Image: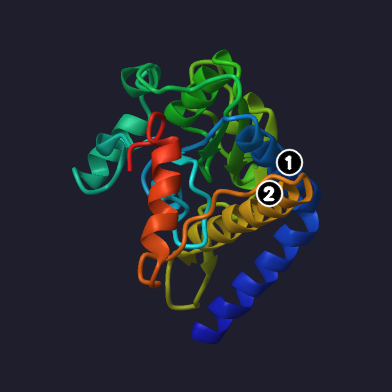
Amino acid sequence: MIHSYFNQIADLLETVEKEEKEAMITAAEKVANAIQNGGIIHLFGCGHSHILTEEVYYRAGGLVPIHPIFHEPLMLHEGAVRSSDLERKNEYAKTFMEEQDIRQEDVVMILSTSGRNPVPVDAAKFAKSKGAYVIGMTSIGYASSQPSRHISGQRLFDTVDLVIDNHAPIGDALLSHEKVKVNFSPSSTVIGAVLLNAIFAESIKKMTENNFEPPIFLSGNLEGSDEHNQMLIAKYKERISL
């Protein structure tokens, strides 16, 4: 199964690169423009999707102005089953989104592979109400196969300015076996991490081409990196808690 998983992931990455290239370029342009104009990049996801918001936060070789929207009851460590229940609650997003400093010059990325639950949909709607440019990362095929749980009947891909399809299969699991009753081995975290890092890499290139120095963290384990990083932390400290 190891070989099968690697092959399936490789095939999926190839599909995503081909099918989502234009959307990724657009996303990178929006990210670059936001940072050049003093904005920051917010990311939000529930459950396992929140892992991707940490993947690009305070990351060696990554962009500095990245703000993950952490709401611990929607993560896994305070109760995995409870986090799933809360994600299904309409209007629950108000309990934490209203305190977020989201501005017109910002980009907000909402991550939800199933795209059907109310909290990501409401988070996207709130961000748009603040004038931010909102990007949704989801599986259109998965989301389209299931009824929305949002009171409006909308899914995440209905509510954002730009959709990036991670092409995860229905249920997220890639593999099957004749003696296993259900599919297994998820795809969305691997694909999501590649998507985000590719988008940010392209945005760094675009900033450089615009004669703007991209704010990039150096690894704290490199000699001489502390001064570089502290200067960038000080620059963004009013908007991002590091």
Residue type, label 1? Glu
Q: State the image coordinates of residue 10 (x, y, percent, origin top left).
A: 65, 73
Measure how far apart labels 2 and 1 are at the Cα level. Answer: 6 Å
On the rendered image, what quadrant is the C terminus found in? top left
Disc 1 element: helix
The residue identified by callout 1 is 29
Q: Is residue 96 left or right of residue 43?
A: left
Compared across the picture, whether 111 is left or right of 168 comes to left
**Which of the pair 128/178 is nearer the observer?**
128
Labelled pair 2, 1 in contact (Cβ < 8 Å):
yes
Label 1 crowd (10 A; few <14 / some 14-19 / many >=20): some
- Residue 129 image point, x, y percent: 56, 13
- In the picture of the structure, the residue carrying the numbered disc 2 is 203
User: Element type at marker 2?
Assistant: helix
107 vs 221: above or below: above
Q: Is residue 117 above or below residue 174?
A: above
Residue found at x 48% / y 47%: 64
* Mark with earlier residue (2, 1): 1
Q: Amino acid at mark 2?
A: Ser
Residue 162 placement (x, y as % from top left) = 70, 34
Label drawn at residue 117? none
Colouring: rainbow
235 and 124: which is toward the camera: 235
> Which residue is depicted at the point 53% across and 22% down?
127
Q: Residue 54, can we see it? A: no
Tell me what residue is drawn at x 62 percent, y 24 percent.
159
Toward which corner of the image does residue 128 lie, by quadrant? top right
- Total labels: the figure holds 2
**Mark 2 neighbour class, 10 Å CA radius: few under 14, some 14 to 19, many 20 or more:** many
Question: In the displayed structure, would residue 49 be above or below residue 107?
Answer: below
Percent from the top left, x then y, of residue 229? 42, 54
